[in-house]
Image (tube, rainbow, N blue to C red):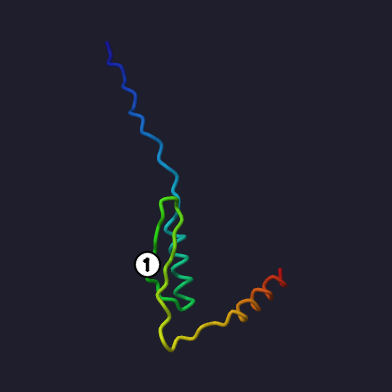
C-alpha cells in the first residue's frame, strides 16, 4: 500500500503592494533635480507617501510662481 500524498499547506494570500520603491525613487530624483534637499519620507499605512523637503537655505534662488504658471500654460497649449 502506497502512502497518500499530502496536500501542500495553503498560505493566506499576500496583500497587494501599496507602493513601489520605484515610485519613491522617482519622486526623490525629481526633488533633487529641482534643487530641493529631502528631509524625510513618510510612508502611511494606506500606501500614500509624503516627501518632506528641508527649508530653503539663504542664497538659494526660488522660481517665481508666475514662471511656473506660464510654463504650464505653454505645455497645455502644445497638447
Q: Kindly indicate the quadrant of the structure image that contains residue 11.
A: top left
Tell me if 8 is positioned left or right of 62 in this view.
left
Q: Residue at x 46, y 56 (%)?
A: 48
Depth order, front residue of 52/35 = 52
Q: Quadrant of the C terminus?
A: bottom right
Q: Position of residue 55 (x, y in %)?
A: 41, 77
Q: Position of residue 39 (x, y in %)?
A: 37, 71
Tell me if 68 is positioned left or right of 47 in this view.
right
Q: Residue at x 40, y 83 (%)?
A: 57
Tell me if 6 is positioned left or right of 26 in this view.
left
| Above or below: residue 48 compared with residue 41 | above
State how many labels appear: 1
Q: Position of residue 64 (x, y in %)?
A: 57, 82
Q: Quadrant of the N terminus?
A: top left
What residue is disc 1 on? 40
| Above or below: residue 10 compared with residue 77 | above
Depth order, front residue of 4/54 = 54
Amino acid at each position: 500500500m502506497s502512502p497518500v500524498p499530502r496536500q501542500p499547506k495553503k498560505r493566506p494570500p499576500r496583500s497587494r503592494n501599496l507602493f513601489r520603491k520605484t515610485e519613491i525613487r522617482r519622486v526623490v530624483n525629481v526633488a533633487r533635480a529641482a534643487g530641493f534637499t529631502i528631509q524625510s519620507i513618510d510612508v502611511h499605512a494606506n500606501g500614500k507617501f509624503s516627501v518632506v523637503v528641508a527649508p530653503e537655505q539663504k542664497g538659494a534662488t526660488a522660481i517665481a510662481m508666475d514662471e511656473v504658471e506660464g510654463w504650464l500654460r505653454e505645455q497645455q497649449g502644445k497638447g
